[in-house]
Amino acid sequence: MQEIAVVGGGPAGLTAALYAARAGHSVTVFEREAAGGQILYSPLVENYPGLPKMSGVQFAEALTAQVEELGVETVSADVEKIERDQNGGWLVRTDDGSVSCRAVILAVGSRHRRLGLPGEEELTGAGISYCAVCDGPFYKGRHVIVVGGGNTALQDAVLLSGICSRVTLVHRRKQLRGEARLAEQVRSLENVELLLGYTPEALLQENGMFSGVRLKNTETGQEQTLPGDGMFIAVGQIPGTAPFAGLADFDEAGWFAVGEDCRSSLPGIFVAGDCRAKGVRQLTTAVGDGAAAGVAAVEYLEEHR
């Protein structure tokens, strides 16, 4: 029996565990991959207030060590189901056994939708990024490619146009999917070029670094090579919420519809991080959610002691 189970070992989940452990509660964090979550793919973290520059791996390792020093147990396991147990608490079922607890914090995050091209994983952090806010400054004065046609891709193009010498936005449709106001803004930028009706077919690399992309015209089938110093992929995110239906309300896109207090409609279930419906998904907002969820879970345990 643990007092609190945290599902997800990214910044939100680890911060929630940190706050709960500091309040004197027993905590287990379940993570099916490596502790750290999406921040592991960031080559450099330099936008976290008060911290010097460090890699995403260094940040994840430091945060994991910090919570483990407080007695938090981190378990490598895939959580398959969460259900009520016979004592009124919660039973966390994993692929390696079950654990009973009094409260659960869901910090299951999200993942960026990939293009699915060979070499994409290997080049992530080596010229390919999914976060213009995080990694855009690394490409100051250089040419970058943005893939996508929705609001995120358009916002990325606007942001990068103020940093990079040239931005090429590639979208598979002839029309942009984002808001008309954003599309008009992008079209007005002198250093942004639109390639509409093209799909990425292959990634190019040189010495292990991204160097460009081969594109295919969706109408003619003609291919062309587009060199670039970096590529930002903005074709959507997939929330990790699906296995936990019934534990918290979903919005129409599948994100947990939970407010900033991180309390779900079920007593003892809390939500934190990128899996929550919100406008900004950054490292700072993830740890903010983690703190709120950890404090809320502690308050719940005190109220129901």
Image (cartoon, rainbow, N blue to C red):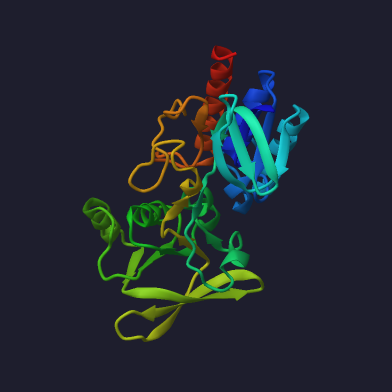
Q: Nearer the viewer, residue 233 or 166?
A: 233
Tell me if residue 52 comes above or below residue 166 in the rendering. above
Q: Is residue 231 visible?
A: yes
User: Residue placed farthest to the front in the image?
Assistant: 86
**Is the residue 89 above or below the residue 137 in the image?**
above
In this rendering, the count of numbered labels is 0
In the picture, residue 190 is in which quadrant? bottom left
List x then y, in percent, for residue 130.
50, 56
Residue drawn at the location 62% of the way across and 32% of the way down: 5
- Residue 6 lies left or right of residue 117; in this view the side is right
Q: Quadrant of residue 64?
A: top right
Please identify the quadrant where the N terminus is shown: top right
Where does residue 152 sit, x and y in percent of width and height? 37, 53
- Where residue 296 appears, x then y in whole percent? 52, 22
Query: Compared to 250, does 43 lie above or below?
Result: below
Q: Quadrant of the C terminus?
A: top right
Q: Is residue 168 left or right of residue 187?
A: right
Residue at the (49%, 63%) spot, across then down: 114
**Residue 106 seen in render:** no
Task: Write the residue at 38% across / 57% down.
Answer: 153
Viewer-proximal residue among 135 and 70: 70
Viewer-proximal residue, 279 or 265? Answer: 265
- Residue 266 on image: x %, y %: 45, 28
With 293 as the anchor, is 197 left or right in this view? Answer: left
